[in-house]
Image: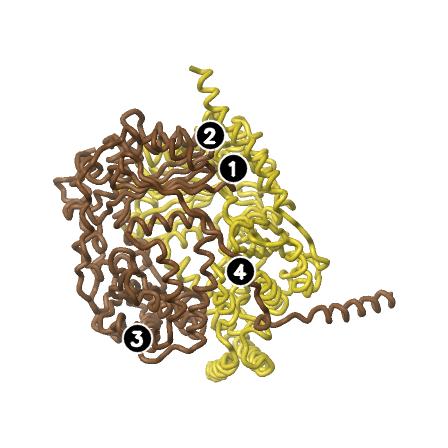
Chain colours: A brown, B yellow
Amino acid sequence: MTRRLLSLCALLASAAIAQTVPSYKQLVYPPLKQVKIPEPATFTLKNGMRVFLLEDHELPLINGLALIRTGNLFDPPDKRGLSGVMADVLRSGGTSAKTGDQIDEELEDIAASVESSMGESSASISFSGLKETAGTVLGIFKSVMTDPEFRQDKIDLTIAQAHSGIDRRNDDPQGIAEREISSILYGRDNSYGWSIEHADLARIHRRDLQEFYHRYYFPKNIMLAVYGDFSTPAMKEQLEKLFADWNPDEPPVPPFPPVTAKPAPGVFLAEKSDVTQTFFSLGLLGGTLRDPDYPALQVAVNILGSGFTSRLMSQIRTKMGLAYSIGAGWGAAYDHPGTFRIVGSTKSPSTAAAIQAARSELEKMRTTEVSEQELKTAKDAVLNGFVFFFDSPAKTLARVLRYQYFGYPSDFLFEYQKKVAAVTRADVLRVMQQHIDPANLTIVAVGNPKDFGKPLSDIGKVEKIDLSIPPMPALTRPVK
Amino acid sequence: MKFRALIFLLIPSLLAAQSVAELQKSFEKKVTEFTLANGLHFIVVERHDAPVVSFHTYVNVGSVDDPGGQTGLAHMFEHMAFKGTPTIGTRNWPAEKAAMDAVEQVYDRLDAERNKGPHADPNKMAAISNELAAAMEKADSYVEPNEYDRVVESNGGQDMNASTAEDSTNYFYSFPSNRIELWFLLESSRFLNPVFREFYKERDVVREERRMRVESSSQGKLIEALAATAYAAHPYRNMPGGWASDIDHFRRPDAERFYKQYYVPANITLGIAGDVNPAEARRLAEKYFGRLVARPLPSQYRTVEPVQEGEKIAAVSSPAQPFVIIAYKRPDRHSPDDAALAVLDAVLSDGRTGIIYKDMVRDKQMALGAGSDAEFPGGKYPSLFLFYVAPSSGHSSEENEKELDRIIQQVKTTKVDDETLQRVKTKLRAALIRKLDSNAGLASELCSYYVAYGDWRKLFTELDDYNKVTAADVERVANTYLVKEHRTVAYTYVPGAGAGKEGAK
């Protein structure tokens, strides 16, 4: 017993010596291994479709993504939501040979998928399947893209679901805050800012879907990326053959309508009775990734509100304990001004205090230079994490495709890296002053004002947001 | 015709089955496992394509282990695990430690006064509260804020976060592969010597998290009511976030006791996936994690949920559009019926061909969304097989409930056809293959399969279990478990407008 104890003591003593480990500050890191950045094969099919291929043999899968130059920015103002309905029924409404339900079964029998979706300034059709079934999946993908039937029963289904979605749009307070600040910043007369209403849906018909489809879904307007377990020459040949009989042509698609909104400063309140927190958003119209100040703005706004070490997090969450979720993003977009936003939520009684604190953190960024350590942390986070832009072939291919689609130079990311490395404390102060004018700030709060400790009017004159949902005009209600 | 259909069915599944067996074989070569003398278990997966590594720490403790009256404590500790150590996160540790201890002494006096109940002196309480605020401010003045997070982020760490569920607590992030040693240093230090600084500020943050996820979300409130109603005795009745008043009264020593009891090396599994050399990983594991002292495993939770003697109802008043959940009692994941329940779940609601989607969403259009979940809220203990519905506008919750009952009756009385069964099995196989393409996903999956089943290979071999499931098995488990007397129906209703209608239940 005693001996055992003794040897245990000796063991502990030696363990204590072994326990001396360095401080993280003393660690020296070996140079990072060279990243292998795969180069996709690119070519144009005879019908004009641009193709990007990238092999990845780790798993027996084949995936693809087609980008179509269109978007809900092309929705007619009296038929908001048309493009979204079209994209949904493109897949569910089947092809001339098969119903959508038949396609569902055929794809799921082989654990594959083909999906279609619509964004603001791009549409997509994607596919995924096991290698052995590539031929079948590609065949279905092609017929969904080139030969949609837009069957009426599925148009009815999608529109009925969209009506239900409208009825549910005020159930999630976070969602309300995001939607309303977009509406105020971009204006309600364009798809960045408008909401789809029951009356819009009632005006959408099958011929509208067909016209929208024919205007935008043609080979020269499509880029197709395929990655996975295949050989490039064989896939090239397969795609040439597959799309040989699809040759429609249309005039080039016009540019997307520009954003024309003016600043809309103010404090806006949407009342919601069934919450114990207020969800808030402070924002203004920002810029694009092309802006020469974009790298400095990213660094600046990251110091303000990105990650666990940002000022908003340190002050409002860690020091004040007023929020679980709080942060900010510069929000640059590829092709139009994005929105700078501070987003957070706090218990109802501290609504005004949390918003004030966020505003004051923003103001500090505009009046005093950040510390050298803050700048270094923000830059190191980007530069040391840079390798994660290249950690999978799928990511690389998606980026190549996106740069091509929006007309960005292929070395854009490396230029960004260089510019981030060169950002100074003075740059951070300058871009905060130049691009973020607090006089233009739009503040949206969604919450229960009965429980606000200090009234929201302490922050500024409050304008109420009407959340009521316009009912469907009686005459257009479909008869079932 | 019949023959052709048969070939069509067999070929893809046969190919997929082969490729899964091959995948497991090639996967074995990439995996290295070792256990340190103190009981910590490591699973290392080599994937050298890109110089990045993902790390996952899976602790076999969850909200089921929260002490009575302290629901949410496992989650509270999870937050504290980012607060640093005696060397990370402080400007002056001896002074900070003294100030933190002073906070507890003042808090003890406050609690002592509060414990007098109706005899407590409000003036005294207010005075001590002021003292407490001052003591906290002093302790906080020594803090180097968020240093732990800053080291991770400035070294290129990605997707750093943590989660607390009923069965487990998970910590995870990724680094460029030249910073592997930094993870070993940081991760071992926070579990060797965690310092619970800024405890009471973080308690407020945790309380805000509950307000956001539960109190301000109609579905959050509904799920909380479902769990609290379905379970009478077992702690699956509490959400991982805990009850508000429990959170408000956490003390730092509570979290420290919890840590000492449950964060013992043998209760922790670590997954590392990516550009990593297993021999180097082992050397670093010995060096850094070898510092943790072996301690006995905590006892497993003992209370067994008694048999439910009749249907239960939970009605939640909410101005939001209606939502319904119907949950049936089912056994834990080690039940021989587990695979058949997973297949039943997939038959009911996987993809666009699931019975519920086709019937209720697509054809009858009574639901905006509807589906099932074979295992809620966990798998370690007997849990719930649940159905959920968001009714379409113009369609009632009752109408949807009736239709769900009809579908359940159908799977109890009609065997699933071969084509459907085969399709589901093929999809389960493909889902596995798709899981294997991310470092973070692999590190997490291998840990959880190892902890749940004692072997990460179960990730692959559970496909054999699915494969053996017959249509008769599916019918049998539906009859065994989807029983009205053992279910709980939870729904939201609009006060006033919906009360009469729903009140008729």
Give the residue at x 33% y 76%: A429
Q: Is residue A43 visible?
A: yes
Residue depth check, mark 1 versus mark 3: number of the one nearer the observer? 3
In the depicted structure, whether residue B41 falls above or below residue B146:
above
The residue under label 3 is A430
Q: Is residue B152 left or right of residue A234?
A: right
Q: Which mark, residue B423?
A: 2
> What distance separates the C-alpha of mark 3 from that of mark 4?
33 Å
Chain of the residue under label 1: B
**Helix, strand or loop status at disc 3:** helix
Q: Are there few (<14), some (14-19), or many (20+) residues within 10 Å of tag 3? A: many
Task: Determine the chain carrying the residue at label 2.
Answer: B
Q: Which residue is mark 4?
A: A32
Marks 4 and 2 sit apart, C-alpha to C-alpha, by 45 Å
Picture coordinates of residue B355 (x, y %)? 41, 32
Q: Is residue A346 visible?
A: no
Q: Residue at x 63, y 42 (%)?
A: B28
Q: Quadrant of the N terminus of chain A?
A: bottom right
Proximity of marks 3 and 2: CB atoms separated by less than 8 Å: no
Q: Which residue is mark 1?
A: B342
**Residue type, label 1:** Ala
**Chain of the residue that carries numbered disc 4 in the rendered image:** A
**Front-most of residues A17 and A197:** A17
- Name the mark nearer the viewer: 3 or 2: 3
